[in-house]
Image (cartoon, rainbow, N blue to C red):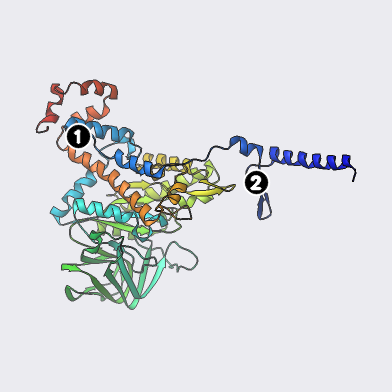
């Protein structure tokens, strides 16, 4: 080949490469089942530097944001809470910024022990809360504050082991509303509050044993009350509890098409027990509690986006929440919907689905307060580099807006983690705080998130307690006061206006 032809050939190849660099789509070119990629001008032009989140600094800042650094006087305490309510990015966001949002709930929790009641919190979520992760941390903190113990509600048949209790079942068939193709569906919609039930026909049993898991909390090991939530039982249906502190005590029911709750209050804590069933019934849940106070129930729905509740029988849900004295419902969803979101229209459609679910839950649980926990950051590879899923920040913002306009509080887990790019660093952290799928937390990471959630929630309780000592009009005036004016007033500690707050204080 002549040199000129060789030169023209090389020049032509270079032109083709330049053309590809200039005009090849940044997201690649779909061809059959494959995607062809080529370095593009658009990609290089718009490519930002890799976002590197200092996870240790983020976690430290989150913890510091909950610290009351200047609390020697009532005035300083009010300054902290006012700043927390208005500007702390790690706070639970409240509808209309109403700081009294949880007041009724806190009052009920406080009265629980005196009234001999157990008020329940139902924590629904996706696989992030499987094995009682996150839920167990919040449960421990609430039970330390308000009393109660035990691992709380468990399904009749548990397919994913939890850290808080060991259990097994015999003679029951599991039916579940949500799951993969291997799960069994019922011919009706009476799935109960855990979106599943165990059908006993003839004889069956559920056994439980105190957990030995190293990650379990102490309160979860204390069981002194056992209950069964069931429905559609036959005439003469019998449930008998056998454990190490109680002789066999059978409870027999008349035929009933609605929901029933049977309970054994035990004279001492138990380490293990077996409930034997005879007859026909739908076993919606077993409750393992301990004394009056607060119980937090973990209902993990792997792969779910939180849009299934309207498919559960209304009467069953309403009767169950009433019998259980459920007072707070936590919804933790969003991550599973992310892979199917291609743009703002998909997000808007998802918001409508969730609004319908919240409206339905409010109908069947009219005495409940609602809290939504947004999705964690999620990592995905783009052209060989791990980063946050495109659209996740918009989804998170939309979830917060949707929650607040529907009178639901919102906790922004995405930003508590550190925002965009944080999941990559949680995976790289030593020890790892998230797994190699760049989606799920490790146990250590889940405990960090659970502790932050618990502290954010109990900070509102601290403010509730403080407000019992301050006239309401004074609190309203202070919270709404301009910050700059407050800085001036801070220098005038002896102004009579503040004397009611200082009484009895340093």
Q: Which residue is mark 2?
A: 28
Q: Say above or below: 464 vs 356.
A: above
How far apart, in angstroms, are the residues tagged by discs 2 and 1? 57 Å
* Residue 411 seen in this snapshot: no
The image quarter in which residue 161 lies: bottom left
The image quadrant of residue 136 is bottom left
Query: In the orientation shown, which residue stands out farthest toward the bottom?
Result: 202
Figure disc tally: 2
Q: Quadrant of the C terminus?
A: top left
Q: Secondary structure at mark 2?
A: loop
Q: Is residue 239 left or right of residue 347?
A: left
Mark 2 burial class by Cα count in 10 Å: few <14, some 14-19, many 20+: some
Q: Residues within 10 Å of mark 1 (few under 14, many from 20)?
A: some
Question: Which residue is farthest front?
Answer: 3
User: Residue 414 — which label?
Assistant: none
Image coordinates of residue 162 in percent, x first then y, are 34, 63
Q: Nearer the viewer, residue 429 or 489?
A: 429
Q: Position of residue 200 (x, y in %)?
A: 34, 74
Image spot of residue 263 (x, y percent) = 21, 66
Q: Which residue is pictured at 17% across the width and 49% down the height?
A: 110
Is residue 273 placed above or below 428 in the rendered structure? below
On residue 71, the disc is: 1
Q: Decide: is 214 above or below 106.
A: below
Which one is in front, 123 or 263? 123
- The x, y position of residue 204, in whole percent, is 32, 77
> Secondary structure beneath disc 1?
loop
Q: Earlier in the sequence, mark 2 or mark 1?
A: 2
Q: Looking at this view, is 196 or 247 the one in front?
A: 247
């Amino acid at each position: 080949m002549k040199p000129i032809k060789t030169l023209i050939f090389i020049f032509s190849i270079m032109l083709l490469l330049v053309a590809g660099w200039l005009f090849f789509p940044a997201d690649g070119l779909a061809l059959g089942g494959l995607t062809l990629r080529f370095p593009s001008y658009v990609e290089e032009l718009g490519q930002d530097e890799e976002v590197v989140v200092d996870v240790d600094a983020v976690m430290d800042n989150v913890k510091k944001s909950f610290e009351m650094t200047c609390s020697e006087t009532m005035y300083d305490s009010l300054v902290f809470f006012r700043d927390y309510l208005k500007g702390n990015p790690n706070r639970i966001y409240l509808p209309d910024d109403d700081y009294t949002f949880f007041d009724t709930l806190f009052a009920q929790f406080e009265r629980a022990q005196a009234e001999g009641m157990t008020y329940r919190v139902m924590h629904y979520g996706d696989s992030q809360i499987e094995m009682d992760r996150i839920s167990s941390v919040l449960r421990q903190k609430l039970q330390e504050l308000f009393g109660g113990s035990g691992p709380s509600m468990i399904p009749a048949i548990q397919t994913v082991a939890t850290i808080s209790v060991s259990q097994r079942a015999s003679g029951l068939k599991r039916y579940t509303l949500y799951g993969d193709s291997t799960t069994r569906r019922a011919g009706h919609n009476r799935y109960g509050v855990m979106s599943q039930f165990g059908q006993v026909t003839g004889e069956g049993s559920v056994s439980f044993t105190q957990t030995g898991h190293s990650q379990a909390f102490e309160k979860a090991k204390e069981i002194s009350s056992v209950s069964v939530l069931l429905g559609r039982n036959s005439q003469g249906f019998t449930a008998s509890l056998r454990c190490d502190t109680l002789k066999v005590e059978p409870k027999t029911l008349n035929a009933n098409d609605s929901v029933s709750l049977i309970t054994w209050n035990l004279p001492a804590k138990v380490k293990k027990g077996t409930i034997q069933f005879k007859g026909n019934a739908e076993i919606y849940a077993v409750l393992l509690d301990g004394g009056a106070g607060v119980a937090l129930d973990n209902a993990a729905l792997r792969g779910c986006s939180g849009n299934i509740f309207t498919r559960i029988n209304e009467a069953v849900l309403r009767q169950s929440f009433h019998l259980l004295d459920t007072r707070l419902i936590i919804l933790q969803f969003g991550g599973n919907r992310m892979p199917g979101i291609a743009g703002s229209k998909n997000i808007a459609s998802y918001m409508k689905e969730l609004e319908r679910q919240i409206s339905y839950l409010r109908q069947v649980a009219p005495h409940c307060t609602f809290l939504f926990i947004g999705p964690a950051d999620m990592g995905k590879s783009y052209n060989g580099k791990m980063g946050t899923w495109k659209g996740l920040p918009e989804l998170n913002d939309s979830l917060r807006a949707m929650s607040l306009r529907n009178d639901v509080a919102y906790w922004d887990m995405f930003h508590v983690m550190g925002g965009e790019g944080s999941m990559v660093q949680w995976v790289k952290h030593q020890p790892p705080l998230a797994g190699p799928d760049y989606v799920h937390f490790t146990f250590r990471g889940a405990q960090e998130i659970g502790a932050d959630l618990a502290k954010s929630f109990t900070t509102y309780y601290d403010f509730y307690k403080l407000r019992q000592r301050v006239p309401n009009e004074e609190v309203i005036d202070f919270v709404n006061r301009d910050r700059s004016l407050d800085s001036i007033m801070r220098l005038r500690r002896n102004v009579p206006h503040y004397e009611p707050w200082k009484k009895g204080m340093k």
